[in-house]
Amino acid sequence: MDVSQHLSFFAALFKVDENPTIGMWLLYITIVLLSILVFKLGFAKKLPIAKSVVIYTFLILGCTMLTFLGVFLPVAEGLVVAALILIIYKIRLHQEKKEQAKAE
């Protein structure tokens, strides 16, 4: 059975099957960065520094498990889609607020 045929897009892009050490670190960093982006775009509120540190610490620790799942499942790809949807939402929200301010 050829494992390379069952890898997710990002795992295949980072060649996890050929160079597992570097590939897994790159996949981990990708998942962490995309998770932080999705969190900031969709859920983040202004919090004190200590609470932010705790939240981001647990987010980074949780991404460890997501990285192992992300080798064969489309975890990073789902985060990319979620980030794109949230970016579109934020742009539309900004445009709507600008139009409301102009109307008043």
Image: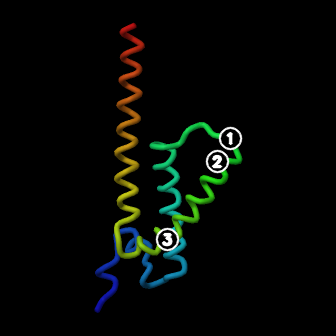
Q: Tell me if mark 3 has few (under 14), some (14-19) or many (20+) residues whose alpha carbon lies within 10 angstroms of its own.
A: few
Q: Residue 31: where, in percent of width, then height?
A: 48, 62
42 and 33: which is toward the camera: 42
Q: What residue is shown with label 3?
A: 65
Q: Which residue is drawn at 50% across and 75% down?
A: 24
The type of residue carrying mark 2 is: Ser
Q: Residue 52 carries which label?
A: 2
Left or right, residue 35 beside residue 1: right
Which amino acid, mark 3? Answer: Met
The image's mark for residue 48 is 1
Dot 3: element: helix
Residue 103, percent from left and from top: 36, 9
Q: Residue furthest top?
A: 104
Residue 68 vs 97, above or below: the answer is below
Res 74 quadrant in image: bottom left
Residue 11 — which label?
A: none
Element on which disc 1 rests: loop
Quarter of the rendering occupied by the N terminus? bottom left
The amino acid at mark 1 is Pro
